[in-house]
């Protein structure tokens, strides 16, 4: 908790001092709670059910935005019951709320919809693919068991860089191109594991060029093809595959949609750079 507060205070200071915002932008960090939390109704409310165990880390295979749907990827993440969000535990009786306020779901409604709907879909998915049934809870008792005493809250936190990271070749490599300025937080519409494919959601995140990951400094002598398995540890292959393939796929989707007559900018996917010097920028 103290870490969140610290973040809030430093942000407040930056906001007060105005123009510092830009100088600080690339140093901002997000304190990401990992492990298991307990979700409970606000302290003053009368409740019928036990609080709900929620393993946050297990869910980092999904985009943060599948739950934190209003998050702009820059500001601190707000709790679900924050003012103006899902403040009320239950929906008000019909007719008692102005229409414009009724759009915001109650806390119970929001949790039930988001958690249960995805779990039900997961269960369906698994059934369709004849996989073993999902561990994701869907019944009342699975989320609200009669006794929750055995479960421990095990919340820890990891500091996640939100600003621009400078990506470089492994140390000692003879480089031909300038390093790449990568807007990390700008990519948080995607699940962390899109890129950090070995991350378990709790341990510290390893660098891409950590020993035995993508630390090979040169292409294999027999082939420079980045799709060849012999180059899977080659850092250039890993980066170019991950970064350029996604940008290219999005660009293709965009072209396809434009060809079929979609001109509304808000319906067209945006993509990152494709040209060499848009990523390897001199400056
Ligand atoms: C996927 C998990 C999940 C499932 C399944 C689920 N709930 Fe909930 N429920 C929650 C969460 C999260 C909250 C909000 C935190 C809290 O109040 O404990 C909540 C809140 C509630 C509340 C308001 C708080 C209270 O204790 O009175 C009630 C009542 C409730 N649920 C009843 C049910 C019933 C009945 C079912 C089965 C039809 C059910 N829930 C199924 C997750 C779940
Ligand atoms: C499956 C839903 C889900 C996903 C996915 C998810 N979170 Fe959360 N997160 C929650 C819930 C629920 C809470 C508890 C909110 C509360 O207490 O009101 C929470 C809490 C947090 C908090 C603490 C907020 C506070 O109140 O101080 C942060 C920060 C956070 N999440 C960041 C993230 C980030 C970053 C990601 C993507 C890596 C992510 N979350 C993915 C559901 C999710
Ligand atoms: C976008 C999809 C999605 C959302 C939203 C989601 N879950 Fe899950 N949840 C999953 C999947 C998938 C699993 C199974 C994970 C696995 O088995 O690896 C899971 C597993 C779980 C588990 C069991 C974990 C375990 O150890 O097996 C609990 C408890 C849980 N979710 C609670 C919640 C609660 C509470 C919420 C709402 C705050 C929620 N989930 C929202 C997809 C989701
Ligand atoms: C589009 C790819 C991509 C996505 C998505 C992504 N990251 Fe990263 N992340 C990177 C790259 C590249 C680095 C720099 C790694 C390096 O220096 O080797 C990095 C660095 C980090 C670091 C610092 C590691 C260190 O060196 O200490 C952390 C922590 C981290 N990411 C966590 C996350 C979390 C949590 C998410 C999900 C919210 C996420 N990342 C989403 C690509 C991504
Ligand atoms: C899963 C898809 C995906 C992956 C993987 C990915 N990107 Fe992107 N990238 C995007 C999208 C989408 C945008 C456009 C975001 C926007 O403009 O809001 C983007 C934008 C960018 C931008 C331009 C940002 C700006 O402000 O104009 C850069 C630079 C960039 N990406 C670099 C990288 C690098 C380097 C990697 C690999 C470490 C990478 N990206 C991996 C999807 C991806
Ligand atoms: C989406 C971003 C992106 C694009 C587009 C891109 N690269 Fe890269 N490239 C990277 C990243 C990230 C690395 C690894 C970090 C580094 O070495 O700077 C890298 C590494 C390299 C390296 C090895 C390091 C060095 O400097 O010798 C070469 C060579 C290279 N790229 C050439 C190219 C060429 C040529 C193109 C155009 C055909 C290109 N890149 C397009 C992101 C990109």
Image: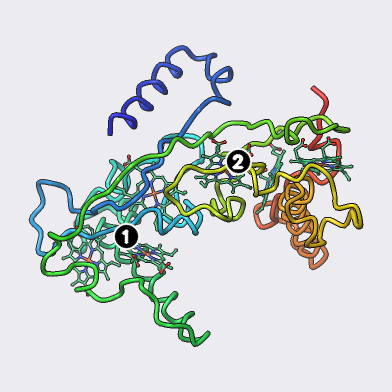
In the image, farthest residue toward the right = 222
Q: Which mark is residue 37?
A: none
Q: Which residue is mark 1?
A: 110
145 lies above or below 234: below
Q: Could you tell me how far apart the alpha carbons at marks 1 and 2 are, in whole angstroms?
A: 36 Å
37 lies above or below 258: above
Q: SS class of the residue under badge 2? A: loop
Q: In terms of depth relative to the viewer, which is nearer, 172 or 8?
A: 172
**Assess mark 2: CB under 8 A from ligand 4?**
yes
Frontmost of labels 1 and 2 is 2
Q: Which residue is mark 2?
A: 207
Q: In terms of depth relative to the viewer, which is nearer, 201 or 181?
A: 201
9 lies above or below 156: above
For disc 2, the neighbor class at 10 Å (few under 14, some 14 to 19, many from 20) is: few
Q: How is the image coloured?
A: rainbow
The quadrant in which residue 245 appears is bottom right
41 lies above or below 73: below
Task: Where is residue 131? Give x, y as percent.
Answer: 48, 83
Q: Residue at x 90, y 52 (%)?
A: 221
227 lies left or right of 23? right
**Assess mark 1: CB under 8 A from ligand 1?**
no
Between disc 1 and disc 2, whose residue precedes?
Answer: 1
283 lies left or right of 213? right
Q: Quadrant of the N terminus?
A: top left
Q: Residue at x 24, y 54 (%)?
A: 39
Q: SS class of the residue under badge 1? A: helix
Task: Where is residue 157? Give x, y as percent.
Answer: 37, 40
Q: In terms of depth relative to the viewer, which is nearer, 88 or 150?
A: 150
241 lies left or right of 159? right
213 lies left or right of 99? right
Q: In terms of depth relative to the viewer, which is nearer, 28 or 111?
A: 28
């Amino acid at each position: 908790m103290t870490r969140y507060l610290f973040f809030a205070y430093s942000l407040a200071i930056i906001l007060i001092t105005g123009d510092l915002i830009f100088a600080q932008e690339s140093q901002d960090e997000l304190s990401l709670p990992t492990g298991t939390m307990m979700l409970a109704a606000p302290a003053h409310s009368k409740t019928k059910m036990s609080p709900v165990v929620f393993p946050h880390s297990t869910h980092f295979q999904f985009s943060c935005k599948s739950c934190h749907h209003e998050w702009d990827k820059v500001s601190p993440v707000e709790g679900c019951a924050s003012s103006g969000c899902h403040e009320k535990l239950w929906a008000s009786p019909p007719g008692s709320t102005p229409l414009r306020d009724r759009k915001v779901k109650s806390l119970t409604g929001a949790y039930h919809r988001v958690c249960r709907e995805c779990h039900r879909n997961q269960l369906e998915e698994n059934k369709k693919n004849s996989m073993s049934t999902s561990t994701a809870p869907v019944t009342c008792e699975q989320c609200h068991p009669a006794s929750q005493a055995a479960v421990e809250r095990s919340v820890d936190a990891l500091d996640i860089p939100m600003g621009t990271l400078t990506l470089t070749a492994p140390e000692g490599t003879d480089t031909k191109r300038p390093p790449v300025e990568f807007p990390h937080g700008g990519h948080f519409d995607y699940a962390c594991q899109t890129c950090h494919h070995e991350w378990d959601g709790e341990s510290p995140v390893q660098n891409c060029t950590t020993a035995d990951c993508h630390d090979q400094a040169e292409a294999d002598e027999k082939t420079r093809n980045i799709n060849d398995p012999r180059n899977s540890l080659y850092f250039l292959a890993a980066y170019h595959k991950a970064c350029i393939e996604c940008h290219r796929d999005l660009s293709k989707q965009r072209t396809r949609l434009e060809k079929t007559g979609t001109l509304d900018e808000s319906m067209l996917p945006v993509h990152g750079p494709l040209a060499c010097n848009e990523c390897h920028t001199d400056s």
